[in-house]
Image (spheres, rainbow, N blue to C red):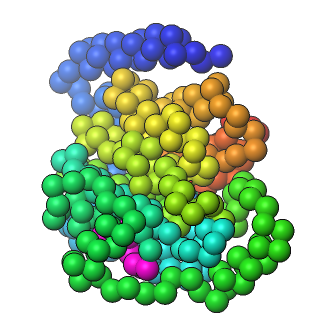
Amino acid sequence: MNTRRTFLKNGVAVTAGLAMSTMSCSGNRKEQKKRSKKPKVISTWNHGIPANEAAWEILSNQGTALDAAEKGVMVVEADPKSTSVGYGGLPDRDGNVTLDACIMDHLGNAGSVSFLQSIKHPISVARKVMEETPHVMLVGDGALEFALSQGFQKEELLTEESKKQWEKWKVESEYMPAINSENHDTIGMICQDQDGNLSGSCTTSGAAYKMYGRVGDSPIIGAGLYVDNDHGAAVATGMGELMLKTLGSFLVVELIRQGASAQEACEAAIQRIVDKLDYKSFQVGYLAMDKAGNTGAYAIHPGFNYAEMIDGNNQLIDSRSFIK
Ligand code: ASP
């Protein structure tokens, strides 16, 4: 079992190992940790494919990781067929579509909105919070008021299709979060631009048929998303309560900072959930990229996948999982 003590021990060993290998191969850069090509974008689930295309358009034209991370996930926010993000998102149990999103740049700036209604692109409002206010997070009516003051328009986000699904659900009204529902959920994206800078974004309509007012991990810096430009970035998807209780994305990046690979860090953060929480009926997936562009992904259950785009090639990759 990977206890805190053993991980810290391993972490120290890995860190010491890295320091030694850097010392022993100084002057011979080829032997240092393998570096992936820049730019690069990764994002959660199969809706990551079109999102990556939009991000790539920016990254391959010398754009910034921040612009790419915003514009990439906006594709999914606008897609009515994506019933877990933005426009067309499944509502709470009372029929309200309430959205959560956050964004972080390479300077450590962060912006977030939560429990936001009637605005199609919460990620862009989160960016405005980051850039135009002295705050990190705005919620509910305050977030809506701010969005309107910034020129965003109010729109009906509950589509006929999502309304139909909600009405069907109301017959039984049983709240039962489904593992890998429809094979896509929150979109979390990490971009690395030509300059090697990292930024990330995360946007969702949250758990379908949640209680009115429920907020998950996605808008919480450190739970749904964390970026440390010196070391790496991580995003999360799945049952937000588990990431909230373990501050999962921060944990992944912190483990990378201590010397773990992106893959080891995702696995250790899932292990933390498995060790501490009732995890069996819930899905959680972590996706991470270290500063060298190496990626990692790990989930509790099989079924989590992510899209990776590098050199103009966009592919869907199955994540490994704790339960096989
Ligand atoms: N993490 C999101 C939440 O709990 C939902 C998801 O990714 O499925 O709100």
* Outermost residue to the right: 172
Report x, y in % for residue 41: 39, 59
Is 231 placed above or below 88 here?
above
- In the rendered view, does 8 fall on the left or right side of 221? right
Q: Quadrant of the N terminus?
A: top right
Q: Residue at x 74, y 80 (%)?
A: 167
Q: Residue at x 31, y 67 (%)?
A: 142
Q: Nearer the viewer, residue 118 or 259?
A: 118
Count of number-bearing discs:
0
Q: Is residue 121 magenta?
A: yes
Report x, y in % for residue 256: 39, 31
Q: Quadrant of residue 28?
A: top left
Is 17 placed above or below 113 here?
above
Is 196 placed above or below 164 here?
above
Question: What segment carries the magenta color?
Answer: 118-125
Q: Residue at x 26, y 72 (%)?
A: 146
Q: Nearer the viewer, residue 262 or 207?
A: 207
- In the rendered view, does 239 fall on the left or right side of 168? left
Q: Can you see residue 291?
A: no
